[in-house]
Image (cartoon, rainbow, N blue to C red):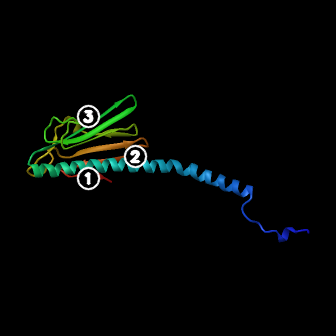
Amino acid sequence: MYVGAKNMKHHGFTLIEMLIVVAILGIVLAVAFPSYQQLIAKQALIDQAEEMVQTINAGRVAAFTQKKPVYLSAKSTVADDAVTWCYGTNYTASCDCADTSCSLSVKQFSDANTTAQLNGLSANDVFIDPVRGLLNKSVAVMTLTDKYNQVVKIEIAQNGTATRVK
């Protein structure tokens, strides 16, 4: 029995249709993937900044509750294309976050994707006064930059509170 083309019903896709869909998906993914990587890197940078803000603000609370000055320590080094930076809080000025000698908190990063400009925090001379919670400097600003040159800034105001600058 002869079946005419008019009576045939198509079930599924043809190979040509499938190849066109795969080609379009490939183009869309090729365009979207770099943006997605930048989005993930930006979020990682924001997470690092928020964690630093929480650590500094917890140090301010510790200064009030323990009635002792809390020193802020930070260090950033670059060697052999590897960036290492850290920060920490301690009740004494002898805190070195690279040696994890900070008694209150310490966080270390060994990441080639993020660099940190710590603007004066590396000298262990920044502390939060336990009486009023004030910073002994006017304003301290730290800048974190990722490999896509996306920047997140953290500011410690004169009143000792740390915030991420948007």
Closest to the camera, between mark 3 and mark 2, is: 3
Report which residue position mark 1 lands on.
163
Position of residue 109 measured from the top left corner of the image (x, y, whole percent): 33, 39
Residue that lies at the very extreme toward the front in this rendered image: 1
Q: Which mark is residue 98?
A: 3
Instruction: Using the image as rendered, state which of residue 117 and residue 64 is in the foreground.
Output: 64
Position of residue 48 measured from the top left corner of the image (x, y, whole percent): 33, 47
Residue 76 versus residue 32 in the image, above or below = above
Of label 1 and label 3, which has the lower sequence position?
Answer: 3
- Determine the image quadrant of residue 108: top left
Position of residue 143 measured from the top left corner of the image (x, y, whole percent): 31, 43
Type of the residue with mark 1: Thr
Q: Residue at x 21, y 35 (%)?
A: 96
Q: CA distance from mark 1 to mark 3?
A: 24 Å
61 sits to left or right of 47: left
Q: Which mark is residue 63?
A: none
Residue 97 versus residue 163 in the image, above or below = above
- Determine the image quadrant of residue 24: bottom right
Q: CA distance from mark 2 to mark 1?
A: 18 Å
Type of the residue with mark 2: Gln
Classify 10 Å Cα crowding around label 1: few (below 14), some (14-19), many (20 and above): some
Whether residue 159 is visible: no
Classify 10 Å Cα crowding around label 2: few (below 14), some (14-19), many (20 and above): some
Of label 3 and label 2, which has the lower sequence position?
Answer: 3
Task: Report if the CB atoms under discs 1 and 3 are less than 8 Å apart.
Answer: no
Q: CA distance from mark 3 to mark 2?
A: 25 Å
Closest to the camera, between mark 1 and mark 3, is: 3
Q: Residue at x 26, y 34 (%)?
A: 98
Q: Residue at x 83, y 71 (%)?
A: 7
Secondary-structure class at tag 1: strand
Classify 10 Å Cα crowding around label 3: few (below 14), some (14-19), many (20 and above): many
Q: Which mark is residue 150?
A: 2
